[in-house]
Amino acid sequence: MTYSPAHTHARRYRRLAHKLATYFLLGLGLVIVLTPFLWMLSTSLKSMSEALSVDFSFLPRDVRWENYTEVWRLLPFGRFFVNSFIVSIAVTTLQVGLSSMAAYAFARLQWPGRDIVFVVYLSSLMLPMQIAMIPNFFLLRTLGAVDTYVSVILPQSFVVFGTFLLRQFFLSIPRSLQDAALIDGAGHLRIYALIVMPLAKPGLATLGVFSFMFSWNNFLWPLIMLNSQRLFTLPLGLVSFQGQFSTNWPLMMAAACQSMIPVLILYGLAQRHFIEGVTISGLKG
Amino acid sequence: MGARTSELRTALLFLAPHLLGFLLFQIFPVFGAIAFSLLDWNLITTPTFVGLENYFELFSDDYFFQRAMLNTVYYTVGTVTIIVVASLAAAVLLNERVRFRSFFRTMYFVPNVSSLVAVSFVWMWIYNSDYGLLNNVLRMLGAQDPPQWLSDVTLAMPSVMVMSAWTQVGFFTVIFLAGLQNIPNQYYESAVIDGSSRIQSFLRITLPLLSPTTFFVLTLAIINSFQVFEQTFIMTRGGPAFSTTTAVMYIYDQAFQYQEIGYASAVSVVLFAAILAVTIVQVILQKRWVHYDL
């Protein structure tokens, strides 16, 4: 085949147009993703009269940082932050600890019935949380645990996703390491703690960030279990804020914005683990 | 032989703490919910066994339940459609030879990690008919009387769908992109030699080879959507005129506002059965369109 100069020109133009269109669409996606966040930020710095003014401006004309402190004055936001941290850290610790032990039993030990038990575990990934909601509420109520941290923490701490994820990581660790340690007389507890866990750090981090995020953002379960404001986690705090100041949009946006910050920081630091976790769970499908 | 039995004992020790909690908080409650659904019970009075009466009532004359189920199905169809189209498009674009790929991917994922409650507030304010961002922009573009979005009976649910899709597209983009990157390049190379256009190779190579991923995305997105709660609870409280009341919201109201424990349990069993049925149908239909090879 021979190409005339005009031909190559046309091809080059087409390639350039294709490239421009790709970047244009990707940029458009970015605008769609970011605009709500920017709108939240800009409103959170406006005065109420400016937010509710017919004379529209995206950016605040007069920046009011006081909105952020005002929110803390009106409701115990510090308390909500502490509560969210207590619950999320407890759930994360329990999930990483218990799932890693269970994953060790599934990935590194030989025992009769292992595969059947694992299939039961896997199939429960499909269970909607809502079917367990009412019986769990009843159970915790019978135990007298309504309106306690424990009632919020416990039901969130045995999610199967963690066991599944860590099993994948553990399976990828070469068996020869374990066998060598066994010959040296090490017990399984030592192999788990000193060999498998350190080698599975990326997996533990992935599970850790996911558990923290889910528990930080969880709304329905704390809504059911908690009644007293002093125990509220941030999402509940936000909703009670909405109940009292529903038309004060700048303050609502300042409250919403603050509540997102810890998870956004975590995401910024560990985004590789977030993406990895999603990719792994996607590839099994 | 001795090694085997000792491994069983070790396995039990490792598994027991998680297994007990898993049985207690995830497996037994399923049977608990089924048992509760056969009772007339408001937590205060002694429960009475009523058999399947709750179910008969749900399906014969509970307008609100039927409305909630239909709304949930409508929401699921709309949201999942937007999610699949948008995240596949984003993944295909990201799979081109672009710079800053991981930057785009990272940014697209941000809505997914943000608190759904906080994000619902933000979108409520975007949709606000008098001072919201959307209507301000529409007015600047010349609209005289822009829609009322969340307070309009026909527009409220589509508005919720768009907002929900916005929170999830980045997540599914990551999954689609991983699937696309698994397709061996040689298929495309031979397609170029055969003279296929981009669209032809997308239809004949990408879509068939991506179908296992698409199947996974569909299954997960549908299961998620059936459980929608936060968005409508916060943005619309199920209104206007019950146009956005969803199944989980109905369960929540019946159980925790009116203490109708038996009745609410019946709704939760129906929702569970619906999710299970849809998933089974998908697994059966998968044989027709999911290719594990070209």
Image (cartoon, coloured by chain):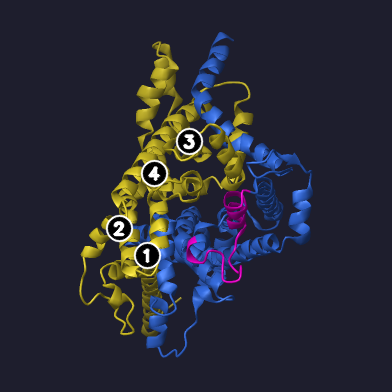
In this rendering, does residue A156 appear at all? yes
Q: Mark 3 points at which residue?
A: A154
Q: Point out residue A10 in the picture as x, y percentages from the top left corner.
A: 40, 82
Name the amino acid type tagged 3: Leu
A163 vs A195, left or right, is: right
Going from N to C along the chain, the mark reached first, 2 or 1, is 2
Q: Mark 2 points at which residue?
A: A74
- Residue B253 is tagged as none
C-alpha separation, residue under disc 2 versus residue under disc 4? 17 Å
Contact, CB < 8 Å: mark 2 with mark 1?
yes
Name the amino acid type tagged 1: Phe
Q: Name the residue under label 1.
A: A245
* Residue at 46 percent of width and 30 percent of height: A98
Name the amino acid type tagged 4: Leu
C-alpha separation, residue under disc 3 versus residue under disc 4? 15 Å
What colour has chain A?
A: yellow
Going from N to C along the chain, the mark reached first, 2 or 4, is 2
Q: Name the residue under label 4.
A: A231
Tell which subunit mark 1 falls on: A
C-alpha separation, residue under disc 2 versus residue under disc 1? 10 Å
* Residue at 45 percent of width and 91 percent of height: B144
